[in-house]
Image (tube, rainbow, N blue to C red):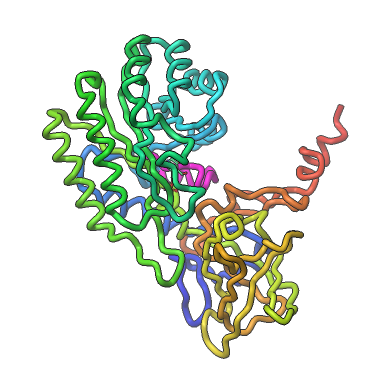
Amino acid sequence: MIVEKDNRLFIGGVAASELAKMHGTPVYAYDEETIRMKVRALLDGIAYQPLRIFYAAKANTNISILEIIRDEGKGRAGLDAVSPGEIEIALNAGFRQDEIIFTSTSVTDEEMKFAIGKGVLVNCDSLSQLERYGRMSPGAKVCFRVNPDVGAGHHGHVITGGPESKFGIWAADVGSAFGIVEKYGLKVVGIHEHIGSGILETEKFLTAMNVLLSIIEKNRDRLESLEFVDFGGGIGVPYRPDQKAIDFREFGAAVSRLFADFCSSFGRTLSLVIEPGRFLVAESGVLLCTVNTIKSTPSHKFVGVNTGFNHLIRPMAYGSYHPIVLVNNCGSGRKEKVAVCGDICESGDVFTRNEAGIADRELPEIREGDVLAIMIAGAYGFSMSSNYNTRPRPAEVLVSGNSVKVIRKPEEMSHVIYGMSAGDKNKP
Ligand SMILES: Cc1ncc(COP(=O)(O)O)c(C=O)c1O
C-alpha cells in the first residue's frame, strides 16, 4: 500500500525518501500489493460468471506490471492491446494469444495481418476495417466495436462514445456491419463498446450497457456465435480530495444483475468482459522528483522540480489533479500556497493546475532539495511520457513489501540523441 506513516510517505514497506536516495529522481515507483488488491477487488466485486477482464495495457505497459496482473488474474485476466507493440508486450508477459484482444483505431492492413498472424482476436473499429478483415480472413472469428451514442469521462479528450468520437461503428450502422459479416462468413464472437475514461458513476456505465444489449437483442438472429460482450473500461479513481471512489459493491451488483437478466432472456450464458486500465494501476504509482528552484512572481510562488509534462502529461493535457506530497513531511507544520512546476520550456508545464490554468496548492513549507511525490501516477504516466526537450525518460521501480526492483532502467541519453546506445553508434 502507499501510506503516510509518522508523517512520511511509504511505498509498500519502503520510505519514498529512501527510494529517491537509492535510485535518484525523477523515478516512477509502483507498489505491487496495490495492483494485486485492485485485480482482486474487480474479480471478487462482480459476481456474474463467467467474468473476464482485459487489462487496457495502454494505462501502463511495463512488462513487470503486466505479469503481476496476469498472475493475480489466475486465468481470468487477459489484455486489451491497441497496437502491434502492445500485442508483443502481452505475449512476452505470458498472456496466451486467446487472452488478447486487438482494439485499435484507424488500423492498417499490416497491423491486422500482424494480429492475425499472432492468433489474436481482432476487434474491428469501423465498417472499412471489418470489410478489409473479412477479405483478409474470411470465415474467421471477429469482434466489433459499437459507438452507442453514450459517452462519459473526466475530460472531453477521453469521451469515446457519441457523435464527436472517432471510435467504433455508429449504432445505426450495425446493420451494415452484419451485412459485411455475412458476406465473408465471419463469426461474431464478441461485441464491444468503451464509452470513456474516469467514470465515477455506475449509472453512466449501465446506460451504455443497456444500449449495447438492446442492439444485441435486436440482432439476436445474426449472433449465433456470440461468446462475450465487452463493455470496455473507464472505471475511474478519485484523484481530487472531493471525489469519491465508485461504489464498487453497487457497481458490481448492478452490472451483474443487468447482464444476468439479459442472458436469461437471450437464452444463453455469455461471458461478461470489462477492460479496466486506470482502475487497476493508477493508485499503485507515484512519480518522485526533487525540488531544485523556488521563486516568486506577484501571482505565484513557484516550486520547480526535475521532471515535467514529458514524464506526466495528464495535468497539462486534461487539467488533471494529482495530489502532491512532501515525502518527509506529509502534512504537519505551516502550510503555504505554491504552484509546483516542471523543467520543460513551456508555461503550461505546471503540475498544480486545473482546466482554467494554474491552481495553487496548499503544501507544507518546501525547500530546495526536498523530494515530492506526485501521487496516483501509475496510469497514463510513464506510458504517455516523451523525450520532449531532449530529456530522457525516468526509471521505473517496483516495490514488493520491503524489496525494490528496477523494472525499467532510466533511458540513456545516447538513446535520446542517436536512437541507440553509444556503443552501437560506432558499429558499422
Ligand atoms: C478500448 C479501450 N478500453 C479500455 C480503456 C481503458 O480505460 P480506463 O483506463 O479508463 O479504464 C481504454 C482507454 O482509452 C480504451 O480505449
Residue 230 position within the rendered picture, expressed as x and y whole percent measured from the top left: 32, 36
Left or right? Give the position of 269 relative to 63. Answer: left
Please tell me whether residue 56 belongs to the stretch shown in magenta. Answer: yes
Q: Is residue 146 visible?
A: yes
Residue in the image at 69% along x and 75% along y: 302
Q: Which residues are magenta?
A: 54-69
Residue 174 position within the rendered picture, expressed as x and y whole percent measured from the top left: 33, 25
Residue in the image at 43% along x and 65% along y: 1
Residue 354 position within the rendered picture, expressed as x and y whole percent measured from the top left: 55, 65
Residue in the image at 53% along x and 65% along y: 322
Total labels: the figure holds: 0
Q: Is residue 21 visible?
A: no
Left or right? Give the position of 223 relative to 112. Answer: left
Q: Residue furthest bottom?
A: 334
Front position in the image: 271 or 106? 106
Front position in the image: 153 or 310? 153
Please tell me whether residue 168 belongs to the stretch shown in magenta. Answer: no
Relative to 414, is 97 above or below? above
Residue 400 position within the rendered picture, expressed as x and y whole percent measured from the top left: 48, 58
Q: Quadrant of the C terminus?
A: top right
Front position in the image: 289 or 134? 134
Left or right? Give the position of 236 relative to 364. Answer: left
Quick check: which quadrant has ligand 1? top left
The image quarter containing residue 195 is: top left
Relative to 40, is 71 above or below? above
Magenta: predominant secondary structure element?
helix
